[in-house]
Amino acid sequence: MNHNIVSVSGGKDSTATLLLAIERNAENLQAVFCDTGHEHPEVYGYLDYLEVRLGLVIRRVKPDFSEQVIRKRDVVLTKWRAEGVSEQIIERAIVALQPTGNPFLDLCLWKGRFPSTMARFCTEELKRNPMQQQVLFPLLEDHKTEEVWSWQGVRADESTSRSKLPEKDEVRDGLINYRPILTWTAQDVFEFHRKHGVKWNPLYEQGLSRVGCMPCIMCRKDELREIANRWPEEIERVAEWERLVSMASKQGAPSFYGPRVAGGGQSVEMMTHEEAQELLNINRVVDWSMTGRGGKTFDMFARLAPDVGCSSAYGLCDNPVFDQSSITAIQPQKAGEAA
């Protein structure tokens, strides 16, 4: 028995991959969403739409870091104290180190920092591990299973590293990573949505070029500006997370976008907790996103009320998809039919 597992993020590429799996009538198909706890609310609504539109259940999985957060309390009370960390910092950390049930926040409380471009532990801990531990590996352990195909919505033109990936590779006995849209362009992906009459995530018509963490540590300057203008509550949420994670850190100054927001080469170690929080925070980065090229001149138009109309990096506003959800669910191709 073979199993086909499609990783669904709510983005254009993973949705197209799911549509392709349905079109090819993949056997024992499962769609799986790894919930990071750091998603835009629109993503959850879109997943609900896909379930109704496609007539399938999208399984939601997420990691639980409660034990790690609790164990860190013991580390703070023993190791930190043995290292001579001040009682004020220890008490502050103990207050903050309470499991919240939000995977992203609990992960950062445990690590005492946010992910960065140099330490992108978020992908491994929030997506890869839950998928493997909760979905793929249990299937492989079933004696009836012959192969598990992990369908991934990866495209070669997204990055140099992805351009070097093969279309498929066996990562362990019986587990195959499959990237069926590797050679597709972004426009190919959107055209595939149109072909099947399935709407793409509405965030693509609200100024975003990617769908995922809100915001992502790799977020572009213009996208962060769009997020801050359209959804200021998301910035406020991250600012609160910064406050909590800073309390769980020895240095007391983790910023969502890292120390690069500090100017003048100032050292975190030389700052008080309050000074670090004032200088290193997402609101400073949002202010920077409102500047013109070079980051020094304020763009007087950037803080204007956001345009609630359509804004798309892919030119989707002039060519919307025809949603056929009221007509019929997508019908899989029969074996032997041309794709």
Image (cartoon, grey):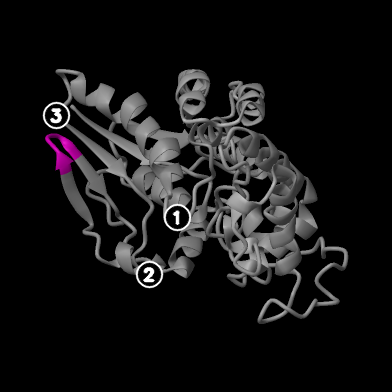
What label sits on residue 146 in the rendered view? 3
Residue behind mark 1: 13
Question: Residue sitting at 72 percent across and 64 percent down?
Answer: 225
The numbered mark, 1 or 2, whose residue comes first in the sequence reads 1
Residue 322: x %, y % from top left: 62, 57
**In the image, what residue type sits under mark 2?**
Asp
Question: What secondary structure characterizes most of the magenta part?
Answer: strand
What residue range appears in magenta?
A: 171-175
Residue 336 vertical position relative to residue 80 in the rendered view, above or below: below
Q: Which residue is mark 2?
A: 157
Q: Amino acid at mark 1?
A: Asp
Quadrant of residue 26 in the image? top left
Chain-order first, disc 3 or disc 1:
1
* Secondary structure beneath label 1: helix
Q: For residue 172: magenta?
A: yes
N-term mark: 2 or 3: 3
Residue depth check, mark 1 versus mark 2: number of the one nearer the observer: 2
Residue nearest the observer in this picture, 336 or 202: 202
Q: Is residue 149 left or right of residue 75?
A: left
Q: Residue at x 28, y 56 (%)?
A: 338
